[in-house]
Amino acid sequence: MRKQLIFSKTGLLKFVGHLDMMRTMQRALNRAKIPLSYTQGFNPHPHMTFANPLGLGCSGENEIMEIRTEKDISDQDLFDRLNAQLPKGLHVKAVRTLPDTRPAIMSLIKAAEYQILLPDPAGKEAFGIDWKAAVDNLMQQDTVTITRTGKVHGQKRKIEVNARPLIYEAKVEDGRLLKVLCACGSEENLKIDLLVDALYRSIDRMDLARMETIDRVALYIRREDGSLQEESDFSDWPVHE
Amino acid sequence: MKVQIPDSVLLSVQKPARYIGGEVNSIYKDPSEYDIHYCFCFPDVYDVGMCHLGLQILYACINACKKVYCERAFAPWGDMEKIMRQRHIPLYSLETFTPLKEFDFLGFTLQYEMSYTNILNMLDLAGIPIFAKDRGEDDPLIMAGGPNANNPGPMADFVDFYYIGEGETEYEHLFELYRQNREKGGTRDDFLRLVDTIPCMYVPKFYTVTYKDQPADGCDHTGEIESIEPNLPGIKKKAVKTVMRDLDDFPYPDKPVIPYMQTVFDRAAMEIFRGCIRGCRFCNAGMTYRPVRNHSVEKIFEWIDNVLKNTGYEELSLTSLSSNDYPGLYEILAEVHRRYPHVNVSLPSLRVDAFSLKLMEELAEGKKSGLTFASEAGTQRLRDVINKNITEEEILNGCKLAFEGKWDRVKLYFMLGLPTETMDDVQAIADLSKKVVSQWFEIPKEERSRDVRVNTSTSFFVPKPFTPFQWCRQAGYEEFMEKQAYLTKAIRDRKIEYNCHDAYMSTLEGLLSRGDRRVGKVIYTAWKYGCRFDSWSDYYKEDMWRKAIEDTGTELAFYNYRERRPDEVFPWDVIDIGVSKEFLYREYMKAHEGLTTPNCREMCSNCGMRRIAKTGVCYERRRA
């Protein structure tokens, strides 16, 4: 039985990396006695997948995971039992059952929405920096260069990439709350902290790096007409809080 | 007061999950629920400390004491330490982020010598005076326990008191005395007087160590210990190790804290018995954890049930020394496999025979990890000297069976520099490794594993307190390295990989493990010179240790390179560990004659343990 779950990863849990979070989730499923089904083969592992890994240090409000169970279990039962075993900082917000035929969630996700609270170096919400102008300026560029580690001829290198086409929308509200809609998924993906670094670099304030807080709030798939649809919107799901 | 760690700090260090606590099964208490605040301190990085079963046992045990809250702290890795010092962030506990300075007690575990500098560093990061004599009424009491507390010499200047023996027995008593003293408005010293009334506690400041003026044989200026005597009336002569009478009496920690980050051992651990009947003469654990006591089969299954249910782990380790000495071990393993088919089971030391090989294969679900033989010495003569109960025939037969069962990796462990060792014994290490390879070649192609890899590892022998070899001279650096170089040449086989390491750390371990109070200044000086995380190659600063030894005028000739006199006073003579000095000396003499000693189940050798522990294997036969 295929289940989709929306969960949040917040508080200190944002410092737990993706692989460690997966292990934590698997153990919680074990404790909750959810009968996961296992892959076949020499080294079986449970059917448990995540839409897209969340970067270390980012919290996620509406993350998506999918599991397959060996026996049938109701959405409500799964919701209750798993939540009872999750540590503070991980919380299941909604559960639904999906047809087995749907493609894997990882391949469906195309975009993500982030809310980034930018630093306030002057203190007391005085900002000291015109974040709106800085972001608008960045968005007017044709090229936003980010440096990421990648492989060139099989060797690890720092490579420069133009991230501008990956940023669909970016605007600043309330002085320093940056909202970004950007590419996310297995084909095109923007590592959000690299975008924030590019913003700091554009105003020559790299000293502010890692002073922001990043929250991923939604994940999107693409409809057939090309428009985005929020996959993590669970308002009409059978079981949600 | 709570310590605040800004996100930006956690984002700029490696593995921030080391510093955040909040793990599944960690314990949270409301301040109204406790009046004594204890912090268990592991002097190494989180990922290492969290694998330690003793931590899980004591965390559960101390938190079960009435009105006590036990938290945890670890040594921050270098990147975190740097930021903590820059920003004046004090070392804090993982549960409530309370500065360590605000606790009533800090309990350090002494697991290995090369973690001593981390203790000094943790105290310093906590803003607590490093020397016990400099601490005031408001500072926490610094206690130490664990295997290396059995020689309280080297760390005596830094520790307020030692707890000798098994942690399950005396904490409630200790806390009761603490409350009494607090209610009476007693001072720190008043409390330490009360601590002395507990037989297993040792308070260094109440003892004066005097040294002989005349240098010991072969030394320039370092004299033997003349005496270790109480310096106040009413202080006991010796601290006596405390021993659990019945392991089943204590609730085993079936809700262990589960780290978020991947640690070295990512699994549940169930202790099946404590102690060892074998009596290998180099082994500190084998002597000091006597007598052997078993957990009952019923309790083992009850706890395995609970621990798997409470953790969700899919791997289980049944821990003990020499696993095969648990009566009915194979039946237990088969039953574990029947009850929990998905759970991978591992054992630290299983004897290799046809039956165990079959079981291991089943338990590991077809995964064939390497087999390990701790032969320790290359010749039967030397194995008899150290009383290591394994024969060449057993090793070769075990390997033959393993290769036929398609195992393809064998690890062989040896020690260099054992007492009476000659170059013939060293050569025999290479020979035995080759014989193992020959075993594989002798099996017809279609019946054996496709390839074979023999990993031969040597380490250097470090004489330990409370072992028959406590009188031994330890080989010098050059001598160690010559033997290693010889082996590197002697092992010339593409199927054998030889692993070895530099000998200087073994020299340091030798100094710290049999050192006296005078060695404290080497530890302090090395720490001042920047030494910490000495067991990590990325931090180990050999040159600074050499400098610390030189600058403090410490003579390795005294601590390492001389045979100690039969009736010499040892720094650990203030401790009664159960095993008597007479027994150890008898064993030492037998070693020189190459005579072996039967194990505890075959025959009692009157080691002295039954004097202080009226339980376990010492009394098994009588009951039967």
Image: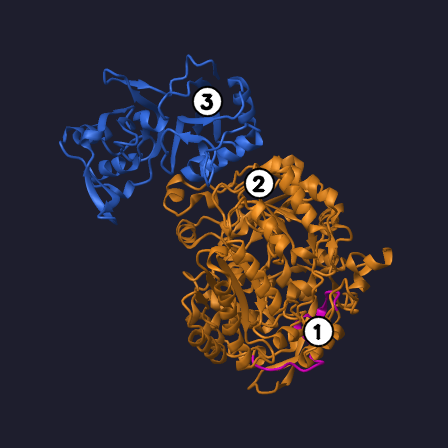
Q: Mark 2, chain letter?
A: B
Q: Which residue is mark 1?
A: B596
Taking depth in this image into account, of A239 and B554 the one nearest to the observer is A239
- How crowded is the residue under tag 3: few (<14 C-alpha within 10 Å), some, or many (20+)? many
Check disc 2 and report its element: helix, strand or loop: loop
Amino acid carrying mark 2 in the image: Val
In the figure, the shade used to draw chain B is orange
- How crowded is the residue under tag 2: few (<14 C-alpha within 10 Å), some, or many (20+)? some
Q: Which chain is blue?
A: A
Q: CA distance from mark 3 to mark 1?
A: 64 Å
Quarter of the figure that contains the C terminus of chain B: bottom right
- Tag 1 near tag 2, CB within 8 Å: no
Name the residue rendered at 50%, 69% in the picture.
B433
Check disc 1 and report its element: helix, strand or loop: loop
Name the residue rendered at 47%, 43% in the picture.
B261
Among numbered discs 1 and 2, the one appearing first in the sequence: 2
Q: Are discs 1 and 2 located on one and the same chain? A: yes
- For residue B343, the mark is 2
Q: Which residues are magenta?
A: B561-579
- Queried whether the magenta region covers residue B563, the answer comes back as yes
Left or right? Give the position of A2 relative to B514: left
- For residue A140, the mark is none
Can residue B143 be seen here? The reply is: no
Rendering quarter of residue B424? bottom right
Q: Mark 1, chain letter?
A: B
Amino acid carrying mark 1 in the image: Thr
Q: Which residue is mark 3?
A: A3
Amino acid carrying mark 3 in the image: Lys
